[in-house]
Image: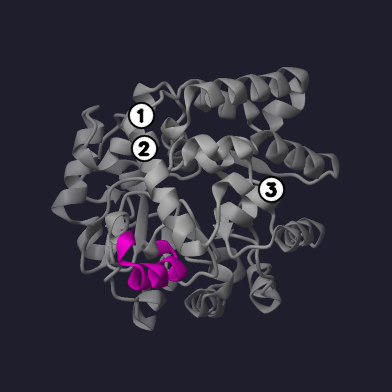
Amino acid sequence: MNDLKPLCYAPFIGTFKQSNKYAPCCVSQRWKEDSFSDFWAGRKLKNVRGKLLNQEWPDECIHCKRKTEQGVSDERKIWDKHFETIDTEIDIDKGNKIGSPFFIDYRPTNKCNLKCRMCFPSASSQIELDLYKNKELEKWFDYPNERLDSNDTIDEIANFHVKELKILGGEPLIDKKVDYLITKILEIKSNENLPTLRLTTNATVLNRKLLEKINKFPKTKISLSVDAVEDTYEYLRTGANWKIVNNNINYFFENEVASQYVFNIVLTPYTIFNLESLINWLFSLYKKGYVFICFFDESCENYTNLSCVLPKHMEYVKKKIFNWYKNNTKVAHNLKINELVDILYSINFDKQNYQKFIEYNNTLDNIRNTSIINIDNRFKDYK
């Protein structure tokens, strides 16, 4: 056992799984393993743990290393909080005293009803279909060739004694594998042994039967993927209808579907001129008495992150958001607008990424018969 604090606790207490790919967390690099046990006791994960204990950044953790160098808050604070909730010691070989993860981030399939512009075929069956139909997308995406988990694998996950199970997709509320997993957990675990359930949804559908099962968990967290509002939202998340999503989100709050709500907000060039409108919409929910947390983060790809935004536009947006922050200080902290401001002020323009964004989005516009200028005329500088 080791009493030193590592740079990050994720590889000691958590596991990310998507098909046969595993990782310590959702933002670290992933690699193939045959099973949970092979991953947890494998040489590669032990190496990650050892480096983090030695205060070194392993290659697999480049995402948080870059954010730390930029002076921006990273995902490690989440794992610090996770670690505070459990009674364990950390160990390079076993991870912790029980020798298995306390927190699992599970993505059963890529089944989804949307094709969001910052997403990938591995997380969206709709984008996967586009990739097979349009060879020009091969420049931007890899073909997902991963196998789907069998029910035996899902049964194994259901039997784990985890503190928190996080489920994403695809879109979990339309995924039969998710329904099977939730049903299985409720069948085999007593109420006091049920984990905290955290589910991320795009809120485009209300699967009431599945939501009733989710509501049986004593503690549930629903993360809502909303990065913009109205026309910008519909352009960014192709296939979504803003009015329906807005109504569904109000339904979640009013019917107390979950015990906690989080808005996951991915920052991209697409949303830059819509940020103030998004914040005003979040403020309107806050004024209704809805309780939620906001989490802002950049898109992980260099051709859809904020480095693609022209300096003149970034300066404009920084001033707008900072003024909103100054005029609504108390509420701004509740909505984590201070963290958004920190991110915006940390961005450096990258001309090469800007050009990649133009090429990438023009490709999507040609395929989808859309135009980015329709959501804001200032995007004429991105054509």
Secondary structure, mark 1, is: helix
Secondary structure, mark 3, is: loop
Residue 228 visible from this viewpoint: yes
The reply to whether discs 1 and 3 touch (Cβ–Cβ < 8 Å) is no
Secondary structure, mark 2, is: helix
Comes first in the chain, label 1 or label 3? 3
Q: Which amino acid is tagged 1?
A: Lys
Which residue does the numbered mark 1 point to in the structure image? 351
Query: Which residue is located at x 69 percent, y 54 percent?
Result: 259
Q: Position of residue 63 (x, y in %)?
A: 33, 37
**Mark 1 packing: few (<14 Cα in 10 Å), some, or many (20+)?**
few
Q: Which amino acid is tagged 3?
A: Val
Q: Which amino acid is tagged 2?
A: Gln
Rendered position, 150 above or below 62? below
Looking at this view, name the residue that lies furthest to the left: 43
Stretch in magenta: 123-137
